[in-house]
């Protein structure tokens, strides 16, 4: 999967967020650090979203299908 990181320099820090996933944001002293932090934050958000959906999923058999989209 590919996501878009938006990164902005703010004084001595870089701040960044992922456009496609609300709540994925981070900061770092270097560009490399903020990119690594964003990857970690994205992984955590996706993992948590999967856990939430698993708890709320209807009982019984469900079909799960992975797919990709181009926008």
Image (cartoon, helix red, strand yellow):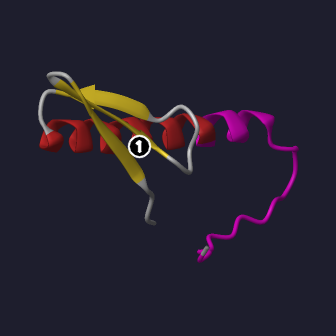
Residue occupying the point 73% across, 33% down? 55
Residue 41 image point, x, y percent: 38, 35
- The residue labelled by disc 1 is 43
Residue occupying the point 39% across, 46% down? 6
Looking at the image, which is closer to me, 56 or 35?
35
Magenta segment's dominant SS is loop
Q: What quarter of the picture does the N terminus occupy?
A: bottom left
Looking at the image, which is closer to me, 9 or 60?
9
Quick check: 17 left or right of 13?
A: right
Quick check: 36 left or right of 61?
A: left
Q: Is residue 55 above or below residue 69?
A: above
Q: Which residues are magenta?
A: 50-70
Q: To which quarter of the image does residue 23 belong? A: top right
Quick check: 26 left or right of 45?
A: left
Q: To which quarter of the image does residue 37 belong? A: top left
Q: Residues within 10 Å of mark 1 (few under 14, many from 20)?
A: few
Looking at the image, which is closer to me, 40 or 17?
17
Residue occupying the point 58% across, 37% down? 22
Residue 54 highlighted magenta (yes or no): yes
Residue 5 highlighted magenta (yes or no): no
Residue 46 image point, x, y percent: 52, 43
Q: To which quarter of the image does residue 27 belong? A: top left
Q: What quarter of the picture does the C terminus occupy?
A: bottom right
Q: What secondary structure is found at the residue carrying circle 1?
A: helix
């Amino acid at each position: 999967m590919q996501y878009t990181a938006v990164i902005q320099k703010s004084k001595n820090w870089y701040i960044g967020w992922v456009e496609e996933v609300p709540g994925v944001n981070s900061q770092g002293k270097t560009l490399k650090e903020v990119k690594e932090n964003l990857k970690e934050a994205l992984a955590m958000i996706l993992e948590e979203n999967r856990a939430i959906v698993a708890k709320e999923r209807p009982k019984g058999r469900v079909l799960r299908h992975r797919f990709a989209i181009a926008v």
